[in-house]
């Protein structure tokens, strides 16, 4: 009986709304005269805790949904075996802490795919997995977008329904500006993106090389390094490539 009563209390627990926040603010003001420590903590928890809990629930649900999809498509893969996979437990825990600090879908998708690839592809070195997840944490969606383009410029243009320019010669930057017109007018930002990718060993190009005169084939040459391609494979969905 006590368990049922406790369960009813939990189920009937009201959710915080605008009125609750206003009431909380009033109580905080009244109680904050002696000192602000407790008040600051209370209002911080009211502002940050509910959205954080919502993020966590959404993230966990999205990962579980994809794991279930994997289970139905990858022969031999069973979710019930994952608790015994120490590498998976470490990676999903690490990825979750990063996911809670992010709201940009491109980064969340990359983290989710990293978790899925860890579940089905145990061959990648564990330290490399950590390095790649750190890259997702450090880099912006623009970095990820540009690296995908660098991996195969011509294919990227085709997949994004952008007409391939009829260049005979020029710099790699000319093709990049066709793919991303906004970068042509934001030189400093584009330069930083390129430097960041190169500094992590994900791209082989720099600003000077991007503007160096090349033949047409040179303009469309892939600029991602082997490490960059490996990183992209790790953050790509294994579901899309699984038959």
Image (cartoon, helix red, strand yellow):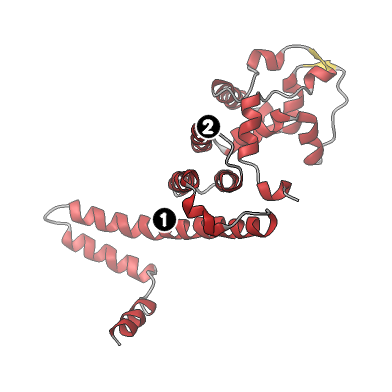
Callout 2 touching callout 1 (CB < 8 Å): no
Residue shown at 47% from the left, 60% from the top:
57
* The quarter of the displayed image where residue 162 is located: top right
Q: Is residue 242 left or right of residue 187?
A: right
Is residue 50 positioned above or below 139 on the image? below
* The quarter of the displayed image where residue 71 is located: bottom right
Near mark 2 (Cα within 10 A), the count class, few <14, some 14-19 or many ≥20, is some
Residue 240 percent across, percent down from the top left: 71, 49
Q: Which mark is residue 52?
A: 1
Near mark 1 (Cα within 10 A), the count class, few <14, some 14-19 or many ≥20, is some
Residue at label 2?
128
Residue 182 percent across, percent down from the top left: 67, 33
Residue shown at 61% from the left, 38% from the top:
234
Q: Is residue 130 left or right of residue 156?
A: left
Q: Secondary structure at mark 2?
A: helix
Residue 89 percent across, percent down from the top left: 46, 48
Is residue 60 positioned above or below 221 on the image? below
């Amino acid at each position: 009986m006590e368990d049922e009563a406790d369960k009813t209390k939990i189920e009937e627990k009201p959710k915080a709304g605008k009125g609750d926040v206003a009431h909380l603010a009033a109580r905080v003001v009244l109680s904050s005269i002696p000192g602000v420590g407790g008040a600051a903590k209370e209002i911080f928890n009211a502002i940050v805790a509910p959205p954080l809990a919502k993020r966590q629930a959404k993230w966990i649900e999205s990962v579980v949904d994809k794991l279930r999809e994997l289970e139905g498509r990858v022969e031999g893969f069973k979710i019930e075996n994952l608790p015994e996979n120490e590498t998976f437990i470490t990676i999903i825990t690490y990825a979750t802490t990063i996911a809670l600090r992010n709201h940009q879908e491109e980064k969340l998708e990359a983290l989710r795919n990293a978790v899925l690839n860890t579940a089905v592809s145990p061959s990648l070195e564990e330290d490399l997995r950590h390095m790649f997840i750190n890259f997702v944490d450090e880099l912006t969606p623009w970095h990820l977008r540009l690296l995908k383009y660098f991996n195969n410029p011509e294919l990227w243009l085709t997949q994004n329904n952008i007409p391939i320019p009829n260049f005979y010669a020029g710099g790699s930057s000319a093709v990049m500006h066709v793919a991303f017109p906004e970068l042509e007018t934001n030189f400093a930002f584009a330069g930083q993106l390129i430097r960041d990718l190169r500094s992590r060993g994900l791209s082989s190009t720099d600003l000077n090389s991007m503007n160096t005169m090349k033949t047409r084939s040179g303009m469309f040459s892939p600029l991602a390094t082997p490490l960059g391609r490996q990183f992209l494979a790790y953050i790509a969905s294994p579901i899309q490539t699984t038959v």
